[in-house]
Image (cartoon, helix red, strand yellow):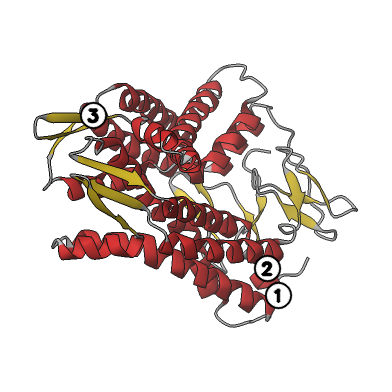
Amino acid sequence: MPGADRLMECHECGLRHTVPELPDGTAARCTRCGATLHRFRAGSLDHAFAYACAGLVLFLMANLLPFISLETSGRVQSASLGTGISALYHQGLWELAGVVALTMLVAPGLRLGTLVLVLGGLRLKHPPHWLPRLYRCADLLGPWAMVEVYLLGVFVAYVKLIDLATIIVGPGLYSVAGLMLAIIATGTSLDSETVWREFERKNLVPPRPPVDLRHPAGLCHGCGLVSNLPPEGHGACPRCGAALHQRRPESLTRTWALVVTAITLYIPANLFPVMTVISLGHGEPDTIMSGVFALADAGMWPLAVLVFFASITVPVLKLAGLIYLLITTRRRAKEQLRNRTVLYRIVEAVGRWSMIDIFMISILVALVQLGELATIEPGIGAVSFAAVVIVTMIAAMTFDPRLMWDAAGQNHD
């Protein structure tokens, strides 16, 4: 019933709350770890729909308009959003081309398109029944849409090239900047719980069932509904159909496996070259660290610090953070639970920013193809580094932070 209190479970510590209907502009936060449970804004769906429409238009403009060009010694090399992907593919690094295509073209485009369909469909008198399934897809694509990271990669590439050649910025690049703002505005306006409650109001999903807390209940990671589990301990969410478990299955084991995989991949990522700059027939391969030293030697200290932080510090700290969380959970540590939850929040949020180096390489490879004058070739180390970023992101998604509180005896079902 509209206006009735709802049982909600914190997705970070597992504490259950009875949340009343919120006044406009307010949010419900977990009393134990501070995570946001639900944020209500009366016009959020309308605002998010407008931002998503604007973002979709800007996405098309970014792909159709001139993006960026490099001019040196009378020669001009132009690049579009797809040029770097094509250059990586034709140089044999199809894995890297696929990663850049997924994070810069496929995920942002599909996410904006699906959000426009979902939020536009909710405005109809009789919305189509497939909107909830489409919204689940849009939600899954969110972490992989990295337009803001790509834009920072463009900035790094621009600074590296500005002293070597004339850089001509096209309207496509300004469209990417606008696209980034539109995506951020859409994300901040949209609250997943508000969307699912609107699906309920439009009779697109079954009404939420009553929950008997005398029996095991689980939180759906697809829509956030708390519902009782079947006798076998797992099943499908009655609201969205996603797999329903009391906790993520084999969370610690899977996270350990992914962390070990990431550590193994991080070794060749640092030993092998990520790119080779060939000028007048001569060139030396650059690893991540040698690239940082080259920036520092050229006097670009702020840029050197940025690349070092994104490519060295963030992956190492993220792996160290995950190992710390895994070990303390295994030890059933009871201290610093809230601080460890905040650490998990940070680990989950910062991992994607390590993609700066990969995006920078894709732009440089696309722009600096001037024959004998100058050429930049990608290296196999970039493939390993991109794999490290993706694997650590998946590891953070696989880890269930509620297990920390379970192990410390703070949750009782």
Q: Are marks 1 and 2 in contact (CB under 8 Å)?
A: yes
Residue 305 percent across, percent down from the top left: 26, 64
Q: Nearer the viewer's eye, disc 2 or disc 3?
A: 3
Instruction: Give the SS element for disc 3.
Output: strand
Marks 2 and 3, the one that precedes in the sequence: 3
Please tell me in which quadrant of the rendered image residue 302 appears. Answer: bottom left
Residue 254 percent across, percent down from the top left: 68, 61
Give the camera-side residue of 103 and 239: 103
Instruction: Give the SS element for disc 2.
Output: helix
Please tell me in which quadrant of the rendered image residue 395 appears. Answer: bottom right
Give the camera-side residue of 113 and 413: 113
Q: Is residue 333 left or right of residue 36?
A: right
Marks 1 and 3, the one that precedes in the sequence: 3
Q: Is 71 drawn above or below residue 12 in the view shown?
A: above
Under mark 1, the amino acid is Ala
Residue 252 percent across, percent down from the top left: 68, 66
Residue 43 visible to an observer of this rendering: no
Under mark 3, the amino acid is Ser
- Residue 407 is tagged as 1
Residue under the point 48% across and 32% down: 106
The residue indicated by pointer 3 is 78
Q: Nearer the viewer's eye, disc 1 or disc 3?
A: 3
CA gap, disc 2 and disc 3: 51 Å
Give the crowd class for mark 2: few <14, some 14-19, many >=20 residues within 10 Å.
Answer: many
